[in-house]
Every structure is written in structure tokens, then in C-alpha cells.
Image (spheres, grey):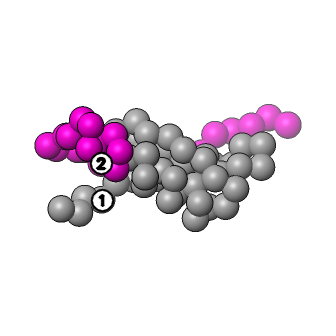
């Protein structure tokens, strides 16, 4: 069975850090592709050990903030 998950990615100290908010897995890589591949592997391993029936996808939006510089 194939399921879709969300990857939230940011840069940190020269690494790409990938987070899957649906299940809480986090991984990293030197490239974007490596970070996502590592996150996929971590998520697969977690779900093998702790299967989940339903997973809610997060809502993603943007917002603006006033910054006084």
C-alpha cells in the first residue's frame, strides 16, 4: 500500500532537515534529495513497528508579520 505524507524542510548548519508532521519522524541530509530519502526510510521503519490506520494531513498556510527595523 502506498500512502502520502508531508515533508517540511529547512536548512540548518549546512544540512537539509526534513520533518514529517503526520507521524513525527525527522531526518537530515547534505542535499534536499538525501534528506527526503532519509525521511522516507525513517517513516517506513516507524510505520513497520507502529502501524497507523488514519493519518491527518496538516494544513499549510502563510501569514505576514510587521517587523520594525
Q: Position of residue 68 (x, y in %)?
A: 80, 35
Look at discs 1 and 2 and give the one toward the viewer: 1
For the C terminus, the quadrant is top right
Q: Where is residue 47 in the image (x, y as percent from the top left)?
A: 28, 43
Judge by depth and name the residue closer to the eye, 49 or 25: 49
For the N terminus, the quadrant is bottom left
Q: Name the residue under label 2.
A: 57
Identified at 30% across, 59% down, the residue is 4
Identified at 70% across, 56% down, the residue is 30
Mark 2 surroundings: few (<14), some (14-19) or many (≥20) residues within 10 A: few
Judge by depth and name the residue closer to the eye, 7 or 36: 36
Side of 46 relative to 16 (left or right): left
Side of 13 relative to 42 (left or right): right
Q: Mark 1 points at which residue?
A: 4
**What is the magenta range?**
44-69
Identified at 43% across, 39% down, the residue is 25
Q: Can residue 29 be seen in this view?
A: yes
Q: N-terminal of the two: label 1 or label 2?
A: 1
Side of 28 relative to 23 (left or right): right
Residue 24, image quadrant: top left
Is 60 contained in the magenta span? yes
Secondary structure of the residue carrying tag 1 is loop
> Do labels 1 and 2 touch, CB within 8 Å?
yes
Residue 54, image quadrant: top left
Judge by depth and name the residue closer to the eye, 4 or 59: 4
Secondary structure of the residue carrying tag 2 is loop
Amino acid at each position: 500500500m502506498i500512502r502520502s505524507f508531508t515533508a517540511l524542510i529547512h536548512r540548518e548548519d549546512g544540512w537539509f532537515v526534513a520533518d514529517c508532521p503526520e507521524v513525527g519522524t525527522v531526518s537530515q541530509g547534505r542535499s534536499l534529495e538525501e534528506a527526503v530519502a532519509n525521511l522516507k526510510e525513517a517513516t517506513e521503519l516507524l510505520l513497520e513497528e507502529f502501524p497507523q490506520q488514519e493519518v491527518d494531513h496538516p494544513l499549510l498556510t502563510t501569514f505576514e508579520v510587521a517587523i520594525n527595523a
